[in-house]
Each structure stands twice: as structure tokens, then as C-alpha cells.
Image: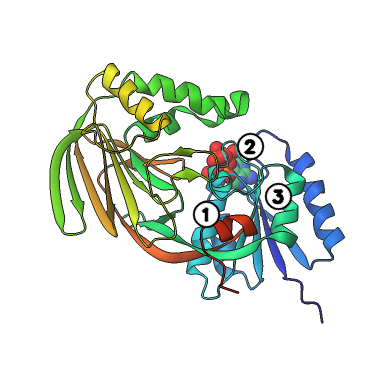
Amino acid sequence: MSTLPRILVIFNPTAGQDPAEKVRPALVQALDDGGFEYEIRETQGEGDARRWARETECDRVLVSGGDGTIMEAMSGLIENPRDVPLAQLPSGTANLLARALAIPIDREDALQLALHDGVAVSMDVGHLIDHDRYFALMAGSGWDADLIKAADRELKNRLGFFAYVISGLKSLFSLTRSRIQLTVDDQTFRFRAHTVIAINVGEIHGSGVALGSNLSPHDGKLDLAIVSPNSLAGILRVVFRLLTRRYDGATELRYFKAERIRVEAHPPLNLEIDGEPIGTTPFEAHVVPGGTQLIVPRDYAQAKGLLPKA
Ligand SMILES: Nc1ncnc2c1ncn2[C@@H]1O[C@H](COP(=O)(O)OP(=O)(O)OP(=O)(O)O)[C@@H](O)[C@H]1O
């Protein structure tokens, strides 16, 4: 009897800039070469990936798509009564989850990891309660949500990742602060800010790029970042702090760690979940510790102390 995992491939033919005719043959070739038993299902739109992942009886789900498709499949797997790990063939525009977990973006390397070399580890996920949506990276209100709303499909097709850079710069100049009421576990705070982000994964592994210090999707907590400068000079100060990794000691950039948070804003702020617009504030989120199983590089798992001690 074969000991290879039976694989459900969830394939989003519209993700990213590479046409499906280029991605699909490479995928089929790698699966055939490895001798796997597999099924490939192509998404038609929102909801397919979540439903198929929730219902699958395979041993592993391999998602070919961007962060949106991966998160849909991850949500389905959280609802699947069996523990089924998720592997990725990052084929989106930003591929932030892959980059954060040190998963290669190169197609062949990613397939080698997804099918052969990777190890399964648990990772926390966030849950946006009112929307019943899970997030791996973050749920954010304010600037991040504005820029994601501005980077629509047409702009992403035309410019790829630069769509986010351009819409991010544009949104920076129109930021206005809202009155925020923030509940962090049992404590309530009131202040003015233009951006409040609940972060699960906030660091590109090994790159030095991070949204804060000691952010970890393996600590059973969400990190909350609050950005509140009221002028362009203040915004540039925050950007400089982030780039130079000086996160502490500024009132314009504050952090909390929590298991549960609630954000109300007046006027309401745009809201995004893992790079997808999802209406406006208020939002309430909590962490599901170790809620998902992911296939990651052995080096990443080792660096994070996630491998069983030999
Ligand atoms: N066949 C399809 N036709 C059109 N849209 C689809 C299809 N299948 C899935 N979708 C939509 O694709 C979106 C997810 O895209 P995904 O995030 O994976 O790629 P992306 O937008 O290129 O990448 P990124 O999130 O990195 O920018 C979901 O909104 C989903 O509904």
C-alpha cells in the first residue's frame, strides 16, 4: 500500500499574473512524477475552496492561488473534523503568507517543498467573529484596507505587486484619524488613530521586514498595532521606525498583545482580511491557538522551535 498522501489540489485559474495554462502543466507533472494519487479542482469563484477543503477526505490539500484562495481553503480545513495540512503553490500577486513562512515563490521549488520536503506544523489563526471568517496574516482597518481596496483586479493584472505600492502611496495622502474605542481582552481604551491592525503573521521570515517586534503566529496571541500620526511628517516618522525596526517608545505607533480584541471607529474605517476588502469597522477578532496545520520548510520549523525534540 502507498504511504504517499492523497492530495486534493485546489486550483484558482485567475490568481496572479501567470496564465493557468502555464501553472497547471507544471503542477500535473510534479504530481505525476511523484506518483501521487490526486484530484485537481478548479475554483469558479468565492466559496469553492472553502467548501472543498471542509469536505475533503484527502490527506493533504495543495492550494495553487494567492493569499485569498489559500485563506479560503484554510478556513475550510479548520472546519474539517480531520487534521489535514495545507501546502501551497504560491501563484498570487503578493503571496504574503508564503513569504512569511519562507515558502519559495519559484514554482519548482514550491512544488518540491509542498510534495516532498516540507513538514507539517501548527499555526495560530485569527477569527473575525461577526463575519465568521478566519485570517492567517491580519485583519486590519484603516490604511492597509484603503490600499487593498484601491488595488483592484485590473490594476493587479497590469502592475502585479506594484499595484499595492502605488495604491499604498496614494492612500497615505488621504489618511484621516477616527475616534477609536478599543477593547483588548477586558480593558477598554479610547484614542484617535487612522489604522488599527490585528496581526497574526507580521514578519517576512529571514528578511528583516516586520510590522513589530516579537510577532509570532505560534504564541497563542494576536498582536495589535495602532498607528495614529496626524500629519505627513508623523506618517513618515512611523514608516522610518518600521524600516529601521525601532518599534517601541513612540505614541504614534503602539502595540498590544491579546487573545480577543474589538475595534469601533467613528467615522468607520475600511476593513480588510488577509488582503481582501471586507466592509468597514466595527470588528471583533479572537485567536484560535494552533488552529491550522501548514506545510513549511524544515528550516523555518526548526528556527521557530516547532519540531519535536530529537
Ligand atoms: N474561476 C474564477 N474566476 C474568477 N474569480 C475567481 C475564480 N476562482 C476564484 N476566484 C476569486 O479569486 C479570488 C482570490 O484570488 P487570490 O487572492 O487567490 O489571487 P490574487 O488576487 O491574484 O492574489 P493576491 O491575494 O496575492 O493579490 C477570490 O475572491 C475568488 O473568489
Figure quadrant of residue 143? top left
Residue drawn 44% across and 33% down? 148
Between 184 and 219, the one lying in front of the other is 219
Q: Secondary structure at mark 1?
A: helix
Considering every residue shown, the one lying at the far front of the view is 310
Amino acid carrying label 1: it is Glu
Beta carbon at label 1 within 8 Å of ligand 1: yes
Residue 262 appears in the picture as rendered? yes
Viewer-side label of 1, 3: 3
Give coordinates of residue 266: x percent, y percent: 17, 36
Q: Is residue 181 left or right of residue 171?
A: left
Give coordinates of residue 267: x percent, y percent: 20, 33
Sequence-first tag of 1 and 3: 1
Beta carbon at label 2 within 8 Å of ligand 1: yes
Do labels 1 and 2 touch, CB within 8 Å? Answer: no
Sequence-first tag of 2 and 3: 2
Amino acid carrying label 3: it is Ala
Pointer 2 residue: 16
Question: Marks 1 and 3, how far apart in space?
Answer: 20 Å
Between 42 and 222, the one lying in front of the other is 222
Residue drawn 24% across and 31% down? 252
Residue 45 appears in the picture as rendered? no
Do labels 2 and 3 touch, CB within 8 Å? Answer: no
Q: Quick check: which quadrant has ligand 1? A: top right
Pointer 3 residue: 110
Total numbered labels: 3
